[in-house]
Amino acid sequence: MDNQNREQLYKYFHDSIRKDADVKIKALREEIDAMRHEAEVMFENALKEDQTHAVNTAKEDISHEFQMRLTAKKYELDLTIKEKRQKLLDELLVQLNERLISFRESKQYGLWIKDKLKLIAIDEYDKMEIDENDQTLASYKYDGQKIMTSGLLAGFILHHHDGNSLIDESFKNKIEEVKLWFYANSGWFSEPEDNQ
């Protein structure tokens, strides 16, 4: 997968997930604001009832309770957001798998394979792992051993004859790279920022 396709894939992930998350985050923030407003009204009413020392004590109690409730609600909302983000990411990865399988069945895939293999001194590799459903690579003329592997989707893994190195151009590996990049760079699965 070339860098331009990878960048387009990253941008697709980022834009799709960001759009859906922004809508959900806005709704969750509105709910927090309404809860804040409700607590502030409750707080003001308690202060108006009595101006004595008892009211100051009640104020501290109410403030503490409000902070505890607000903290609990924020924690609950943060968990909900993370769960929804994970679900959305999982759905996007399912769509990506489907698109990659579709690409595997296209003529462009055969051209992509030829371009990748031209860049490799293939005679130094004595084993090639390919997905068991990859008809393009199954019919590719290769002097080494072909190993049919389930779950690679498309692409190949070449094993060097020295047994110490390999080239992994499998789509399974590309998806894992995208996931790792996304987890590291999206900021979605780290501690949420306090936007107050």
Image: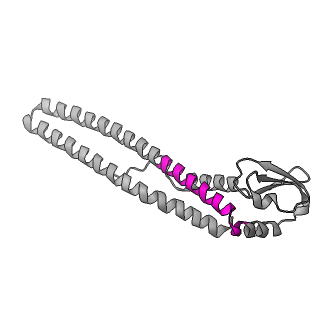
Kindly identify the residue that appears in the image at 77 percent across and 48 percent down.
149
- Residue 8 in view in this figure: yes
Q: Is residue 96 found inside the magenta-colored segment of the image?
A: yes
Residue at the far top in the pictured view: 54
Residue 69 sits in quarter: top left
| Place of residue 42 in the rendered image (x, y in percent of width and height, measured from the top left) | 16, 39
Q: Is residue 64 found inside the magenta-colored segment of the image?
A: no
Please, is residue 112 above or below residue 163 in the view?
A: below
| Place of residue 152 in the rendered image (x, y in percent of width and height, measured from the top left) | 71, 51
Which image quarter holds the N terminus? Answer: bottom right
Q: How many marks?
A: 0
**74 or 149, which lies in front?**
149
Kindly identify the residue that appears in the image at 63 percent across and 67 percent down.
5
- Residue 168 in view in this figure: no
**167 or 34, which lies in front?**
167
Direction from residue 180 to residue 82 in the image, left or right = left
Kindly identify the residue that appears in the image at 26 percent across and 33 percent down.
65
Kindly identify the residue that appears in the image at 28 percent across and 51 percent down.
30
Please, is residue 64 above or below residue 102 in the view?
A: above
Colour mapping used in the image = one colour
| Place of residue 193 in the rendered image (x, y in percent of width and height, measured from the top left) | 42, 50
Q: Which residues are magenta?
A: 85-109
Q: Main secondary structure of the magenta part?
A: helix
